[in-house]
Amino acid sequence: MADIVEVTDSTFESEVLQAEEPTLVDFWAAWCGPCKMVAPVVEEIADEYSDQLQVAKMDVDNNRDTPAQYGIQGIPTLILFKDGEEAARIVGFRPKDAMVEELIPHL
C-alpha cells in the first residue's frame, strides 16, 4: 500500500508545492459523508499510481489557511499539484475512472 502523507498548513509548501513528483491533495473532513466515499478511491489511486504521483490528505477543520488560499468551498476537493502549480481539480465524489481520466494527462 502506498503512503499517503498527512499535510498541514505548515507543511503544505515543503510536502506539496516543492515536491519533485505531482501531488494529489485530498481536502477532507471527518464529518463529511462524501469524503468517506472518496477515501477508498484515493487510496486505490495512491496504490496504482505510486510510481507517478504522491498522494496527500489535508483535514480542512484543522488547517484553514491552505484551503482558503486555494478557494476550496466544498469538500471533498482533490487538487493535483505539479511543479508547484494547480494542474487539475476534482470537486465532489466521482467514480475512480472519472478521477483517473482527469489526472492522467498531467502525470
Image (tube, helix red, strand yellow):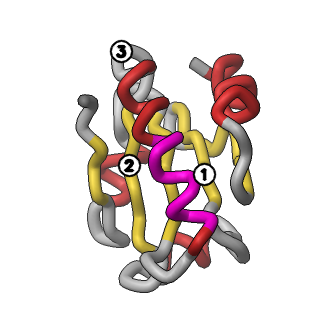
CB under 8 Å between discs 3 and 1: no
Instruction: Give x and y (percent) for residue 97.
Output: 70, 27
Indicate the position of residue 61 as horizontal and vertical percent values: 44, 84
Which residue is located at x 48 percent, y 30 percent?
45
Is 105 situated above or below 31?
above
Q: Please report whichever mark, 3 or 2, sits nearer to the chain's N-terminal start.
A: 3
Tag 1: amino acid? Leu
Q: Residue at x 30, y 44 (%)?
A: 4
> How far from the left and from the top, in percent, is residue 57?
40, 56
Name above or below for residue 81 compared with residue 10.
above
Left or right position of 30 against 104: left
Dot 3, crowdedness within 10 Å: few (<14), some or many (≥20)?
Answer: few
Report the front residue among 37 and 91: 37
Marks 1 and 2, Cα distance to the nearest angstrom? 10 Å
SS for dot 1? strand
Residue 78 among those drawn in magenta: no
SS assignment at label 2: strand
Which x, y percent locates residue 85? 59, 42
Residue at image point 64% right, 33% down? 96
Instruction: Report the magenta residues as a range.
Output: 34-42
The residue that mark 3 highlights is 51
Q: Which residue is mark 1?
A: 78
The image quadrant that residue 74 belongs to is: bottom right
> Residue at label 2?
56
Q: Which mark is residue 89?
A: none
Q: Compute the Cα span from label 3 to label 1.
A: 19 Å
